[in-house]
Image (spheres, helix red, strand yellow):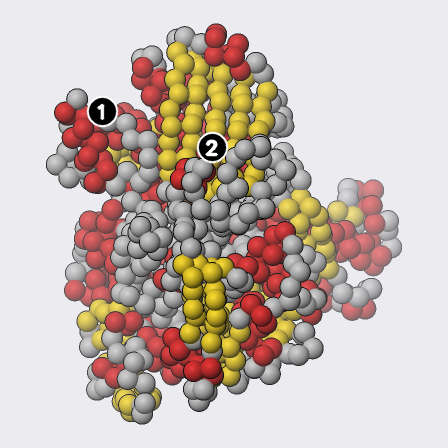
Amino acid sequence: MSKIHVSTTVNGDAVEFLADPRDTLLDCLRDQLGLTGTKEGCGTGDCGACSVQLDGVLVCSCLVLGAEAEGKTVATVEGLSNGPDLHPLQRKFIEHAALQCGFCTPGILVAANALLTQNPDPTEVEVRYWLAGNLCRCTGYDKIIRAVMDAGAEMRGTH
Amino acid sequence: MPKDDLKTAYRLVGTRPNRPDGLDKVTGRARYGADISAPGMLHAAVVRSPHAHARIIRIDASKALALDGVKAVITRADFPTGLTGEDWNLQENTLAGDVALYDGHAVAAVAATSKLLAQDAARLVEVEYEVLPHVIDVDAAMQPDAPVIRAGTADHSVPEGMHPNVVKYIEFGHGDLEAGFAEADLVRAQSYKTEATHQGYIEPHACLGQMGADGKGEMWVCTQGQWYIRRMCSAVLGTEASQLRVTPSEIGGGFGGKTTIFMEPLALALSRKAGGRPVKLVMSRAEVLRATGPTASASMDVKMGMKVDGTITAASVNFRMQGGAFIGSSPVGEALSCALACYTVPAVFHQGYEVLANRPKAAAYRAPGSPMAAFAVESLLDEMCHELGLDPLAVRLKNAAREGAKASYGPTYNRIGLVETLEATMAHANLKVPLGPNQGRGAAAGFWFNHGGETSVSLAIGEDGTVTVSVGTPDVGGSRASLGMMTAETLGIAYESVRVNIVETGALGVNEPTHGSRATFASGLAAVEAAKQAIAQMCARAAAEWGIDAEAVEWLDGAAVPAGPNAGKFPPMSIAEIGAKMGSTGGPISGHHEVTAGGVGASFGAHVVDVEVDPETGRTTVLRYLVVQDAGRAIHPAYVEGQYQGGAVQGIGWALNEEYVYGADGRLQNAVFLDYRIPVASDLPMIDTVIVEVPNPGHPYGVRGVGETGITPPLPALANAIAAATGVRLRSLPMSPPKVLAAIKANARG
């Protein structure tokens, strides 16, 4: 099967790759572009470990074909920090011990960033429902929710 | 850095520094099992049985091998024969021999130049099966008409006349049971069932293996124990353990499920057959659910006698557990030992049966066996307390095991903290919150032994006085932080001056996995001893330089100092100074400690949950949740809380929702996360925690180990809360909405 040439923008960089028509965006990010921060936990859109933003929309990259990224912009966990300066969410996750194994963390950070972008002051219930598509088996979510709320507060300047 | 416990004189222990691997894990840089590649790498895919029980008549891989880019296909014929015992079990589970024993059992594997090609080729491998009758349920598997899964598996412990699927029998106890029941004012007996659940780690199993024709190999793998991987793969492949070098990746959750092998030998065998090219093998979620983990399912009877004042006079348990089609895989022994471990009961008797069924080979899952046992015992205890009008927590305290008491499973307890745990629970503010309609409160206690095990740790002083610690226990939840803190505390240096590395099998003596809640306990103990060795050497170096006896030097705040005024007057010699000149003062300075760690301290916990049950749907909402547990000493309290919270939520999932659902054909029907539904953020409230600290005398900082106890109380605590909210007692898990609703309706009909 011949491959499809895809030109897209990932974390602000113009990139090109060849995708099998069956390759997911997740496969292409990980295997073609070496961006392994985005994880595969299920491959069926149930766990959220592969969360990325595609043209600003939060998606499971395992449910998007690589070829669909043509001409779009993709934002992954690797683009969350600004050089050595961590995003407030990243800092708060470390400070609150909001990760144990860390495997779900990239997807949760991407999803939480999408939440805070559109709702800078979410309630605990809003955070819990927004992240209901991101499975974490280690933490029981308690410290994750606290870290997201605290990052939101810092970004609003209410600390 | 706020200090949680001002009572102690510790500088670092009890504080909450950032974990050293935090930056890598929030930036996506941390490398897990599937995150690396190698030059010339092939990709593998596995052919799995679609039948619960089937004879393999023929495997024809010719169409797969005809595809361009397919480099190897392996079947059981590529593995050595003659293995026995657990090694045979491991080999048989890795790849079926004559008979596929469960839905998802691997029968062949393919390596090809791309992932998609490997998957295509796997579909082209033709397997002809003769479908055999199967059995899934543990009670059904013991019935006289149940299909025999493997005749001759049973060991000598099984009483005459039992079905061949019953492969092991255990009994133990003490005291006069009949007299104990005769002495009771109330004797009750009930039966309980729990369904199998999966560990549910979010990272699927993944490895990258390479092996040449000479039997030398390397493996990168997500595992809780690199030496277990090495030994098991070598046994299954008939190679020598020391020729295989296993490097653990970052691990995306394990909970016991990554203490064994499932598909790792396949990658090595494919590599060997493909001329030594590295082979990457990554499971899909469906493969994880069908063919790895899960825990056992259980059918249990409990009988208990109680006086009107709440004294438990006697108790007996009879448990049946299936752990798949392989002897020794169910945790029935642990379940029996944990069942009554929280209480001092004059007469106890335990009986347990292990039973084969056409299910995947069970693996350890957080406190293996203890949650099921707690569900049965703590549910009955709660029922009897209510029948006698007693406070269930006060009854637990009245009967609580204490230091010096003989445990239900044999040994005598050393210093334990169940009493302190129950007292802290009963004093908590959550218990004073008033409840509304359809709401109920439930409590339960739980236990895990904890574990020491084979441990080897090395520590080296750097040229600048900073310190590297090499440990063999993969970090599943912050142990690099706690190990670094204990090392820095002992050496009197900054936490940031210690780097803890999880090393490969060539770098240390054999280590058991991170299991049994042992990483912070056992690797911590060994790291502290290694640090003390290094301190002794550094004191000797200072003594030599000062021209005084080594005994006249002591270690204080990261420096050698004269021990008292008689030793002479010398300025402190810091670890940095000693490190800088160690080459000319006697050579490198390191510390090393290896031990099969004893001194284990059990960890007890108590949970209290408030629920609301919707009488129209049967759905249970968790309103508030409290975990109280004895940590011994919380080295890094945030990660101790994390273990409590995570364990509780896994238990909540087991109690309310998670189960393996099989069709009449014996196939697993819910092998995706949408249908095998683990708790999500919107299902839960915050999980309140109280860390009780009754230091373990067997550890230099009092550590007990905290990982496992927390999954034990939720099962009965939820059942007790639902009973309080609805008046309906559920004795089988999960207490899913349809089951709760049916029970409510049956109760209303009377």
Left-right relation of B527 to B220: right
The alpha-carbon separation of the residues under discs 1 and 2 comes to 26 Å
* Both labels 1 and 2 in a single chain: yes
Which residue is at the front of the view, A109 or B92? Answer: B92
Point 50% across, 43% down: residue: B165
User: Which residue in the structure is indicated by mark 2?
Assistant: B319
Left-right relation of B251 to B716: right
Label 1: state its secondary structure: loop
For the image, the number of numbered tags is: 2
Left-right relation of B467 to B673: right
Point 53% across, 62% down: residue: B98
x and y, in percent, of residue A53 in the image? 24, 72
* Vertical relation: B93 (above or below) B633: below
Q: Earlier in the sequence, mark 1 or mark 2?
A: 2
Kindly tell me whether residue B469 is visible in this rendering: no
Q: Nearer the viewer, mark 1 or mark 2?
A: 2
Label 2: state its secondary structure: strand
User: Which residue in the structure is indicated by mark 1?
Assistant: B727
x and y, in percent, of residue B329 in the image? 53, 47
Specify the amino acid type for callout 2: Phe
Identify the residue at the far left of this view.
Answer: B616
Kindly tell me whether residue B731 is visible in this rendering: yes
* Vertical relation: B140 (above or below) B380: below
